[in-house]
Image (cartoon, helix red, strand yellow):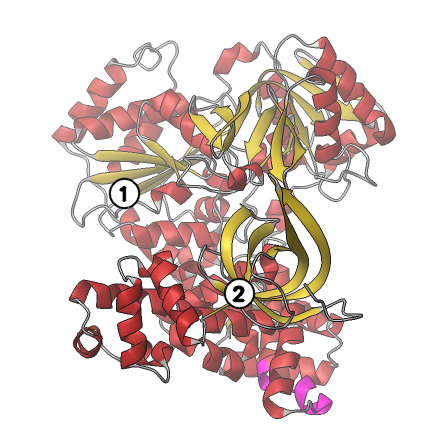
Amino acid sequence: MIFGQGENKITDFEIRVTNIRQLNSKTALFSGVATNNTFVVDGSTLIFVDTHPDHLGGMQPQVGQHWRVSGSYSKSTKKYDKYSRPVINIEATKAECIVPVAHEALIKFIANDKDFAGISESKARKLVKAFPDDLYRAVINNSIEDLADIAGLTQKSAERLKKGFSKYHNMKYANWLSNHGVPLSIVGRIIKYHDFRTIDLITENPWRLMDFGLSFSDASLIARRIITSKDGSLDEVNYTTDPRRIVAATEDAMNTISKRGHTVASRQQIIRQLLEKRFDKKLAETAIELAIHIKKLIRVDENKYMLTGTYIQEAVIAKRLLKLAQIEQWGEQEEKAFTEAIAEDKILSDPKKRSLAQKRAIQRSAMHGTSVITGGAGTGKTTVLRALLRTYDKLGFAIQGVAVSGRASERMHESTGCSSYTIAKYLMQDSPKHGDKYVLVIDEASMLDVQTMFAIVTHLPDTARIVFVGDVQQLPSIGPGRVFADIIISKKIPVSVLDKVRRQADDTGIPSYAASVIAGKVPEKLSTGNITFHDVEVEKIESVVNELVSSMDDEVQVIGMTHKGWKHNAGVEQINRNVQNVLNADGKPITISINSQPHHIDIRENDRVIFTRNNYNKGVWNGTLGKVVKVEQQNDVYADVLTDEQDIIGITHSLLFEMQLSYAITLHKAQGSQFKRIIVVLTNDQMLDRSWLYTAITRAETHVEIVGPEEKLIKAIKTESKAALRETNLDTLLSGNFVVLENVSIANKKRSEEV
């Protein structure tokens, strides 16, 4: 075997894949044999390719495919039984799947690639003979019938051929995008949305990449590459003032503002964001006016601006809810169902236990097409909801419950008995039929953002009823908007407020403590009832948490503020590692094999875990909690997790990287859930306000431990909720104040939802 002298890079080195060794979100490892003469190698040489999935150009290697790789290499010899075999190890910085050009290679490629299943080598040879110049283009351009006729294939084989090559047609676009630096994570979505127009449309306006989640700065870097490759040079002045760029910058400015929860911005706020992008004042003003002119931005009031897509979403939500609010139906049938539902409830049937507010809430929600039931911890929302759903059931309505988090969804099912899904899973189901008697109940409605609510109302027929249930004082949604609060503020939708604490006769002290917090009043005693405050410096929080955890017999949930903590103190990640070592130091670790060597994953048998992505095939959602009950590799499963919903989930390679320790979680992950005991960690001043503290405290059923400096606790109580400061437009729209949009359709503004 002879290698180029002094070479340390492989350029355009082509291999045929013979084995897939490892594929996950962090590693791609595959092997094969050489198919070109970049190096003179003997036929026994085995080539290993090790790279990151981002370098694969949007493709996943498969046995039989041909790949071109570049990167540094090393040479070695590997023993197989009695024989030695030369090996090339490539650490690839670039890899792309290619369609073989040479006839024999192309024949073998078609015969062996699973995308062409059913097309034998003899059939592949006929194809090459029929189209000797460019089989690839011939397949793409000819119909199935023509392919079958010319090449002597069956209709079925021609269909498989067409379908197989269409994938490699997309590969062309994937490689083009990858070569220009587009991240692998969005390549598939871009091609799916733009299809054969991908290259033309992205070349026409590279900032279209922002529609698929790319930041303005990253899209601008790629735009520079595309413009330079197209024009051969880049005029800096023309680039800086390019209308495409300055409009994209305006959109990005609005997106930055929306990350703080706002859907509306003032002109001054937009200009301030553009100045941070090194725009001068004149160019910033020009950018805003141009964005308005091409209807990317609209003026909704004298000094209020919105992205057109966001405005349409809020407007659609408002119109649908207002239409439902007009439904008002109460007759003998409704009265009978209501009376029977009340009589069947142990609490509501007792005049001494029920309240007039609870009865009115049930009645109002059963009467109208849409309604709101709101109240703080322990005020009886669940009792009201059970009776309401029983009323709807007696009236012949199909009932479906949804919640943002999996745990909240499961809790709703347990407390009411109704079918309940996460919103993400619900939106994957078929829509109810128009005219059906159907009611959707949205629990923990304070977590709804504008995009999620828009998806819900466009999924439902306009005859379906909607009931919102939640606590308006809790943390708002992560995404922009404050849907639940705006609905209540508007006073256009029937609202029932439950404000009397009824749960547990307040013997834990939690509801009254929470009520004091949300009212901005510092409790007379910071430790009272089942709430204990530990006044410690931030630097000592971790050791106090360790002591508390080790001293408790019951499971306890730690709720942190951020993953990294305050100056790397008491973050969720560090607390998880600490608690793992306290409670499960000797647990059996999950082990995977990389390059035939065992590697331990820092998750062990008996560890508590949380899933961080929706994986519908596996039946887990972002926020699903569970416990590792068995670590044992069986085929492609490395461990079993028992979820809080009592499902057993087999942990495969992909799930390993979608799972984290959950002894400590952020409040946003905990929202919608209840835990028997909690430890609340106070670190980050920027996040602390009374809404955050209130939401954290009310996650506990029986006991709360608050750990942190006293000044942070008091500051949290005295700081007004940041949710109240969100600028939105939904409450105005619910009052009927709509802007007339000319030549703008909803379909044109749904790109972000579709992709």
- Which residue has dot 2 on it? 67
User: Please, what is the three-letter code of the amino acid marked with disc 2?
Assistant: Trp
Image quadrant assignment for residue 385? top left
Is residue 424 inside the magenta stretch? no
- Which residue has dot 1 on it? 465
User: Please, what is the three-letter code of the amino acid marked with disc 1?
Assistant: Arg
Q: Is residue 408 shown above or below 630?
A: below
Tell me what residue is drawn at x 63 percent, y 72 percent: 38
Where does the N terminus fall, quadrant-wise? bottom right
Where does the C terminus fall, quadrant-wise? bottom left
Tell me what residue is drawn at x 60 percent, y 47 percent: 724
Q: Is residue 306 visible?
A: no
**Percent position (x, y) of residue 398?**
21, 35
Magenta segment range?
A: 235-244
In the current view of this chain or complex, which residue is farthest to the left?
A: 332
Q: Nearer the viewer, residue 476 or 230?
A: 230
